[in-house]
Image: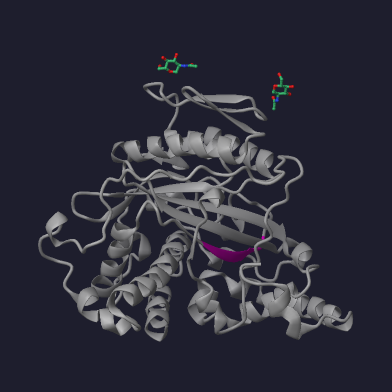
């Protein structure tokens, strides 16, 4: 893991700290890459990442396209997603959000950043915050339009295939809320009906997709140059980044706008291989978390106005009261759509006051350990300097209370396992 960790550190430490937007998307994708590449390298070349050097360091220049691609890459596929089982006892008013607590102490941190393979049933998670998320999204689609939701013509097939997939999956998984129709889907709770066969579509298909789920959505599309581009998105509740800052960019541009030594040859190639080889039948998920020092799910105004030219943790107020600290956890999925080949990235955010999650056994102690274990680069992009004093004092106090109340710290691994 060491080589991979340092690769990741390189990415992180070279990401421009002011570019909060870039860093967030970058981290999401980089973490995928690092772990996936690790797995791939192990699969293909044996135990260590080193073994793959010849492949990774082969110059990315030269003829691109079908001929030079590695074996195992995606080609249009007949793959059909297995039918989803209904979510047990799901109810839009009573099903609670899944309490992801994806943080660990110290060395385990990197290992658990990893990808897990996704169970098909669990592609999209919905809960009793649905109506709030739905209303927030509708308001933001209305207010911000294509700044938040946009589909490039090149991504249109992918966006429509995404809609078709949602229209098939959601009624299987959440039959008490969705009904499949001949031309699309009906949400029986919000009373919306979407006809996805209509042309032209009545609105951007990514906006329609966003209205169906609680997630933010992004589409990465392969162009003839063999690179993946962010060409479709519904980024409505992302908190720290804006679609307009990254739309149309190549993966490597999303990852860093500065010049990173070694990036071009190593990371870029690995990243491309990851995307090229992602198969429709092998979706993956991962979890991630942030601290936010204001209570706005959609946009963390602490880092600046959503309409500011640049946004940055530098502008955030330091040491706000702990009541203003929110725990923002993300559950991300990545899959390739079989017909269009578009890669769909879903980002579901769970948002809770820190003062609430500390009531759970082990959580304050473990979160404090995790925050303390962030390296300088991670600390910078997560804005630690702005809240660490208040947050850590509070977490330590809550942890002490739990220990005084009889918490058996050594039992933690038995009681809570990642990502909970
Ligand atoms: C949806 O329609 C039903 C039946 O007409 C109605 O009772 C319900 O209040 C409507 N829901 C919303 C969110 O408008
Ligand atoms: C959906 O759109 C198609 C194409 O415009 C149209 O033929 C059809 O009548 C519409 N169906 C419904 C239920 O609105």
- The residue drawn where x is 14% and y is 59% is 64
Residue 221 sits above or below residue 313 on the image: above
Image quadrant of ligand 1? Answer: top right
x and y percentages locating residue 192 in the rendered image: 59, 26
Q: Which contiguous range is marked in magenta?
A: 286-293
- The residue drawn where x is 51% and y is 81% is 376
- 156 to the left or right of 58: right
x and y percentages locating residue 230 in the rendered image: 35, 50
- The residue drawn where x is 52% and y is 55% is 119
The quadrant holding residue 174 is top right
- 370 to the left or right of 261: right
- The residue drawn where x is 56% and y is 52% is 348
**Residue pushed farthest left?**
63
Residue 252 sits above or below residue 59 on the image: above
- The image quadrant where one finds the C terminus is bottom right
- 225 to the left or right of 139: left
Q: Nearer the viewer, residue 279 or 210?
A: 279
x and y percentages locating residue 16 in the rendered image: 41, 69
x and y percentages locating residue 400 in the rendered image: 82, 82
Residue 265 sits above or below residue 332 on the image: below
- The image quadrant where one finds the N terminus is bottom left
In this rendering, does residue 256 appear at all?
yes
């Amino acid at each position: 893991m060491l080589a991979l960790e340092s690769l990741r550190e390189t990415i992180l430490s070279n990401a421009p700290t002011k570019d909060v937007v870039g860093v967030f998307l970058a981290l999401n994708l980089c973490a995928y890459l690092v772990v996936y590449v690790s797995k791939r390298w192990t699969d293909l070349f044996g135990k260590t990442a080193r073994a793959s050097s010849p492949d990774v360091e082969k110059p990315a220049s030269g003829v691109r396209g079908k001929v030079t691609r590695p074996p195992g890459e995606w080609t249009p596929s007949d793959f059909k997603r297995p039918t989803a089982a209904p979510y047990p006892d799901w109810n839009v008013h009573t099903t609670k959000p899944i309490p992801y607590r994806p943080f660990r102490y110290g060395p385990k941190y990197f290992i658990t950043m990893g990808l897990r393979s996704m169970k098909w049933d669990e592609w999209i998670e919905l809960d009793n915050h649905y109506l709030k998320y739905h209303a927030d999204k509708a308001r933001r689609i209305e207010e911000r339009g294509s700044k938040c939701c946009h589909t490039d013509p090149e991504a249109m097939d992918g966006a429509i295939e995404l809609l078709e997939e949602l229209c098939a999956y959601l009624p299987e998984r959440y039959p008490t809320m969705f009904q499949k129709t001949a031309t699309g889907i009906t949400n029986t709770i919000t009373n919306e009906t979407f006809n996805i066969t209509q042309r032209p579509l009545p609105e951007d298909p990514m906006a329609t997709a966003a209205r169906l789920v609680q997630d933010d959505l992004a589409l990465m599309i392969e162009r003839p140059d063999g690179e993946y581009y962010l060409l479709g998105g519904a980024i409505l509740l992302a908190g720290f980044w804006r679609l307009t800052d990254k739309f149309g960019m190549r993966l490597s541009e999303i990852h860093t706008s500065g010049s990173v030594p070694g990036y071009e040859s190593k990371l870029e190639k690995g990243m491309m291989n990851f995307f090229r080889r992602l198969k429709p039948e092998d979706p993956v998920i991962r979890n991630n978390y942030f601290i936010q020092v204001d209570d706005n799910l959609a946009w963390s105004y602490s880092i600046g106005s959503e309409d500011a030219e640049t946004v940055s943790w530098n502008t955030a107020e330091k040491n706000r009261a702990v009541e203003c600290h929110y725990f923002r956890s993300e559950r991300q999925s990545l899959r390739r759509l079989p017909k269009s080949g578009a890669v769909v990235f879903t980002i579901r955010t769970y948002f809770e006051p820190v003062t609430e999650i500390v009531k759970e056994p082990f959580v304050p102690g473990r979160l404090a350990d995790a925050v303390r274990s962030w390296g300088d680069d991670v600390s910078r992009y997560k804005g630690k300097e702005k809240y660490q004093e208040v947050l850590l004092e509070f977490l330590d106090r809550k942890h002490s209370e739990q220990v005084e109340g009889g918490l058996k710290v050594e039992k933690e691994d038995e009681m809570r396992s990642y990502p909970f």
